[in-house]
Amino acid sequence: MSLDTTDSYVTEDGRTIGGVVMEMKNITLRFGGVVAIKDISFDIREGEIRAIIGPNGAGKSSMLNVISGFYHPQEGEVWFHGRKRPSMKPYQVAAQGIARTFQNIALFDGMSVLDNIMTGRLTMMKSNMLQQAIWFGRAEREENQHREQVEKVIDFLEIQAIRKTPVGRLPYGLKKRVELARALAAEPKLLLLDEPMAGMNVEEKEDMSRFILDVNDEFGTTIALIEHDMGVVMDLSDRVVVMDYGKKIGDGTPDEVRNNQDVIDAYLGVAHD
């Protein structure tokens, strides 16, 4: 069995959304006796911004961890580019072209912004540890090539002024941008964003929203994001899947989800008459 990846459509703003690149099929994830995800299926299409929303404890981050290989479901299948994906470690998933950011910032505080972003290129580096330690010949050429790509990401995200600053000295909003830069440095085909706006003020959210749209538009990167800010979700997303207590209760366009009574009751907290 293979996925239909040939169909596509054009959005109202002129972007092309392609066929299915990833499909989660009947995913169930348990931790002991606790069911974090129960029999959930949905897909992600090429070029779209796909949001995963729901109340705290709904299982959203667990789902993102399944996609990125941190968790392995007890039931169900993950399909990527038309093939069933075997059980993989996170670095193997990253090598397939899937990168992510984390709900809690996961950067190296003592390292500079540039060096943090360089870690996003690790899966592409071919020289061994000894060659890197000597830093001569192939290792030197390789690092210079990777640094060139990293500098492009730094320019794209407008963080040139802090490129040599230790990350530990940066304010929260800039740390979030550096983490996005590290993920982009891996040149992902699928970018996973776990609450990219969490803890940000209005101005920082506007900046991050703009960068997410630019990544999708200019690089054609497919994006799946978890976000609690419903305004951001409705503005950015092409489609939204809604989770509650580990179950899927809604899936569709922002307008369809906004008017779904199950979503209104469970997530927005507005009961019907």
Image: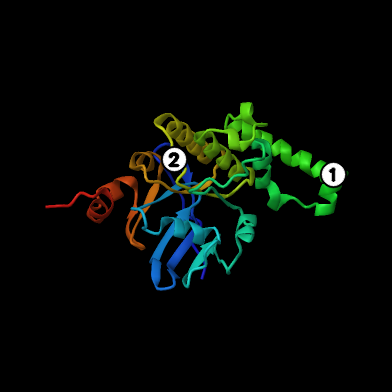
Relative vertical location of residue 64 with respect to residue 137 in this rendering, above or below: below
Q: Kindly give the residue lying farthest to the left in the view shown.
A: 273
Considering the numbered disc 2 on the image, is that residue within a helix, a strand or a loop? loop
Q: Could you classify mark 1 by the number of other residues whose Cα lies within 10 Å: few (under 14), some (14-19), or many (20 or more)?
A: some
* Residue receiving disc 1: 135
Identify residue type, mark 1. Answer: Trp
Q: Considering depth in this image, is 145 or 106 the residue closer to the camera?
A: 106
The x, y position of residue 79, in whole percent, is 52, 64
Q: Which residue is drawn at 61% across and 53% down?
A: 97
* Residue receiving disc 2: 197
The x, y position of residue 236, in whole percent, is 41, 40
Q: Residue at x 80, y 52 (%)?
A: 127
Can you tell which mark lies on residue 5?
A: none
Identify residue type, mark 2. Answer: Met
The x, y position of residue 99, in whole percent, is 58, 50
Q: Considering depth in this image, is 265 or 10 the residue closer to the camera?
A: 265
Report if residue 128 is visible in the image. Answer: no
Query: In the figure, is residue 84 to the left or right of 259?
Result: right
Label whose residue precedes the other's in the sequence (1 or 2): 1
